[in-house]
Image: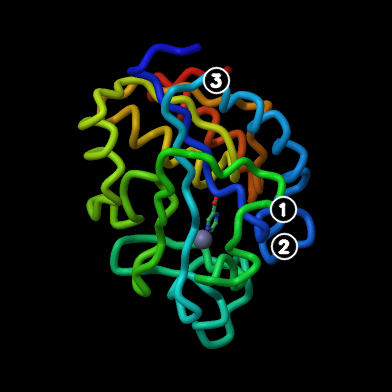
Amino acid sequence: MRPANEALIVIDMQNDFCPGGALAVAEGDAIVPGINAVMDEFRAVILTQDWHPADHSSFASQHANAAPMSMTEMPYGPQVLWPDHCVQGSQGAAFHPDLRTDADLIIRKGFRRGIDSYSAFFENDRETPTGLHGYLSERGITAITLAGLATDFCVNYSALDGAKLGYEVTVIEKLSRGIDLDGSLEDARQSMRVAGVRLA
Ligand code: VGL
Ligand code: ZN
């Protein structure tokens, strides 16, 4: 059993990121059993859930003539335009049916129409907090271990923000899977290493 200052944060293990989903990550479902097992090691387990309104501005469907996976410019910077996914209350937004959900906290993100949110800590404007840092600090948690989907987006941004906030961060690569858009997986691994994130 890990000490009380360590938390496991399971990122976006939702149907839409698994095979058959709207933004499927290859083998996204293959990591469910391993994630369920590793939960036993931690005294604090947190799940994140991507949770968008149906008209979310990160959806290509909200932009004229925009193809899914193309880029646009938002007030806060460049943004990938995604297929509609993880719409609040939909089956796609639900957790994978085999995922253990006996976690201490479920943190939802991406619910503001105008801002996407990859990181479990901050929205994509890099300053609107999700509240997770407050929760972890109040529980005295100083080290976080991340696993889930997608390695190169939500796991990566969560790891980088966690490191910036002063947490000791580990990413379990074998319990994460990536989207890999134009080399984004290798870029993410490099950024995480530079930020002092441990890739386990
Ligand atoms: C994610 C793209 C859009 C993720 C969420 O969970 O990595 N990626 N929304
Ligand atoms: Zn999303």
Residue, far front: 102
Name the image quarter holding residue 99. top right
Residue 168 appears anywhere in the view: no
In the image, which disc is placed on residue 18? 1
Q: At numbered mark 2, what does the secondary structure look like: helix, strand or loop?
A: loop
Vertically, is 64 above or below 35?
A: below
Residue picked out by circle 2: 21
Q: Amino acid at mark 3?
A: Leu
Residue picked out by circle 3: 199
Residue 183: x %, y % from top left = 63, 42
Q: Are marks 2 and 3 in contact (CB under 8 Å)?
A: no
Q: At numbered mark 1, what does the secondary structure look like: helix, strand or loop?
A: loop
> What residue sits 67% from the left and 51% below the top?
96
Report, in whole angstroms, how far the alpha carbon at label 3 lies from the one at label 1.
Answer: 22 Å
Q: Are marks 2 and 1 in contact (CB under 8 Å)?
A: yes
Using a 10 Å C-alpha cutoff, classify the residue at mark 1 as few (fewer than 14 neighbours), some (14 to 19) or many (20 or more).
many
Q: Amino acid at mark 2?
A: Gly
Report, in whole angstroms, how far the alpha carbon at label 2 lies from the one at label 3.
Answer: 27 Å
Q: Amino acid at mark 1?
A: Cys
Q: Closer to the observer: label 2 or label 3?
A: 2
Residue 66: x %, y % from top left = 57, 79
Q: Nearer the viewer, residue 184 or 168?
A: 168
Residue, far bottom: 64
> What residue sits 60% from the left and 44% below the top?
149
Using a 10 Å C-alpha cutoff, classify the residue at mark 2 as few (fewer than 14 neighbours), some (14 to 19) or many (20 or more).
some
Residue 54: x %, y % from top left = 50, 79
Q: At numbered mark 3, what does the secondary structure look like: helix, strand or loop?
A: strand
